Amino acid sequence: MLKTKRKVVFISLFASSLVFANNTTKLDEITVSETGGNYLSGNNAYYKTRTQSATKTDTPIRETAQSVQVITKEIFDDLNIAKINDALDYVSGISRQNNFGGAWDNFSIRGFSGHENTGMSMLKNGFADNRGFNASRDSANIQSMEVLKGTSGSLYGNSEPGGTINIVTKQPNFENQHSIKADVGSYDFYRVALDTTAPINDSFAYRLNVAAEKKGSFRNYVDSQRYIVAPSLLWAINDDTFVSYIGEFIEQKAPMDRGISLINGQNIMNPKTFLGNPNSDDMNIKDQTHQLKFEHYFNDSWVSRSGIAYKDNSFKGSYANNVGKIDNINNPVFLQSRYSDYNSKDIQFQSDIKGEFDIGSAKNTILFGAETYRFTKNSLLNRKANAIRVDNIDSHPTYTILNTNLDPHTNRYEKEKGISVFVQDELAYKDFRFTSGFRYDEVKMDNLNRRNNSSTEQNDYALSPRIGITYLINDMWSVYATSGTSFRPNAGTNKDGETFESEKGVSIETGLKFESEDKRFGSTLAIYQIEKKNVLTKDPTDDQFSIAAGKVKSKGVELDLNGKITDNIKLNVNYSYTNAKVIKDNTYEGKELLNVPKNSASLLLMWEDSLSQDSSYGIGAGATYMGKKAGNYMNDFYLPSYTTAKLVSYYKVNKNLDFRLNIDNLFDKEYIASSYDSYWLTPGNPRTATLSMTYKF
């Protein structure tokens, strides 16, 4: 009986966070039976009481000195989301950034977006997931997403000070659960997904998620295909030892679509116009991820966890794009042709040990850990300017190939190695919760330019501390304050051949949290200020080179409310005020950060009711608002504010069959979602409808 109960508790926590709590975990938030399965209670609808990644110790969100928001599986289901970008619209402080022609995910949190070619800090089950070129993350294998606001350098090292996202994948279950889901929607959207999990025997369980997608677009020549296979296994060796494997294979085929351009710096061209080569092959992105984790309980107070992860990414294909301003709509546009071949490999190892013990009348939780990784990347880029001519760009574009011979531009090999150790201590004394920790990182980067056989070496060192305090006012309210640092290495050299200092960020935050007595609803109000220095800026003595002398600052207020208000009403609402700008720079001082609106908000409201014992329905509405935001680094133009609305609904026929109908951009609003400059603007999607059917067997 003990083995069965320990296994069930382990599996239920594993399904929600991948890293597990010991026997002292508060089980009033989990419904446990002896048959296995997903035992999270109804409080995981739109609100979660716990998250593993914020502290790596399963500390309740209300007691954590940090703003933490969780996008639950039910939010994914109600929004009927295939990719993560639409889900992140429903978290405060997040704005969309240049997405590299629709190929990958790129967002900013509290104004900070990370490297322009790899994006913001992202984790998958606690492992770094943003090194190299990654295809857009697919919801087929996502259980939830945890958004950690502010600095997380003390636990995760190299990251942005605005925040970090941890993707929690779906996990094996010791209960038979199988479903198939089919979607059909506007602009030739077709998708089918299989989710199956079951025990193999008393000790082994498996899960397999498979999805295939074919998608058209309101834009000319922009069709895509997407395939995902995600197997996972769980082995309960005995009462105290567990091993898990999580795999994911993604292939994405789509043309490189840089979007549209401004005409004469102010007029938006026809949003359907494709400024590329219609005859180019699709860009092909292939990602494979393997994670192996081991966990052992020494006793009720001490547990060790170790894991290894391997990623292999490739990004390959031919394309063309506009690289200059367009002054007159009647003039032809000359495009640059390109061929890119990027591939990378990333292997990581991490291990930690957690212990709990009493110090007098206080409870202490200590965490020690270490990480190491090796990342390599090959980059090949050939290009030719004025290779394609496009006429009649705003009505019936015609494309003329002028030159097919490309010139070598980039042929580079990069290697990055990192090693780190960290420690964290959490002390619970009466109604106070104290958190402190730090992490030490060493990063070595080698860069070989194969074109001229030159190479550079760079070594970076960083110490990232964090402190925090939470006061539990009563059983529902708490107040917290926290401060921490972050770092991110700057690659390259200055005009003297010297490497740059790392970017370093400092964050100060305070906030108020609420959690209802039934733990079905919660909210966070946060106020913060972040500064980051050593940002690369042009050398005032030679603008062909850079120096690490820039500084940016972000300050703001965020409010998030989510959960189940009554038995019939679910609510997710947020608002953020973000004032992010450059405060020191030789070129951009005083400029607002790219694609970051000062005001943004979203709302998702659902009404649910039962029709019979096995039948129910839900209907709701959503809205997102984005204020005006800078369209390029120079703030030469701004993207107008916009509001979009959506309708969401489902009808559960019985326990095995349900239908969903969602209408996005209900009022067919024309808007620009993000930009890089006046020649790369991403137009938002028009009104679309999606009908889905899910059958469980």
Image: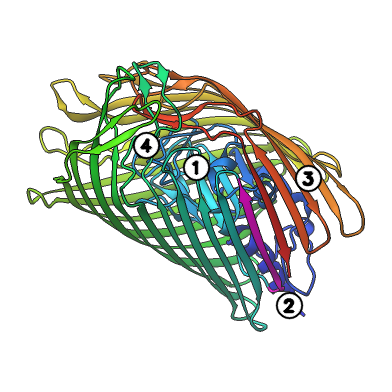
Residue drawn at 33 percent across, 36 percent down: 503
Residue at the disc numbered 2: 4
Residue drawn at 83 percent across, 61 percent down: 654
Amino acid type of disc 2? Thr
Q: Main secondary structure of the magenta part?
A: strand
Q: CA distance from mark 4 to mark 1?
A: 14 Å
The crowd level at tag 1 (other Cα within 10 Å; few <14, some 14-19, many 20+) is some
Q: Nearer the viewer, mark 4 or mark 1?
A: 1
Q: Is residue 624 left or right of residue 413?
A: right
Q: CA distance from mark 2 to mark 1?
A: 50 Å
Q: Mark 4 or 2 closer to N-term? A: 2
Residue at the disc numbered 1: 217
Q: CA distance from mark 4 to mark 3?
A: 42 Å
Is residue 578 depicted above or below 469 in this figure? above
Q: Mark 4 or 3 closer to N-term? A: 4
Residue 674 % position (x, y): 45, 30
Residue at the disc numbered 4: 258
Residue at the disc numbered 3: 520
The crowd level at tag 2 (other Cα within 10 Å; few <14, some 14-19, many 20+) is some
Is residue 319 depicted above or below 365 in this figure? above
Q: Mark 2 or 1 closer to N-term? A: 2
Amino acid type of disc 1? Ser
Q: Which residues are magenta?
A: 174-185
Is residue 475 depicted above or below 72 in this figure? above
- Residue 120 appears in which quarter of the rendering? top left
Q: Secondary structure at mark 4?
A: loop
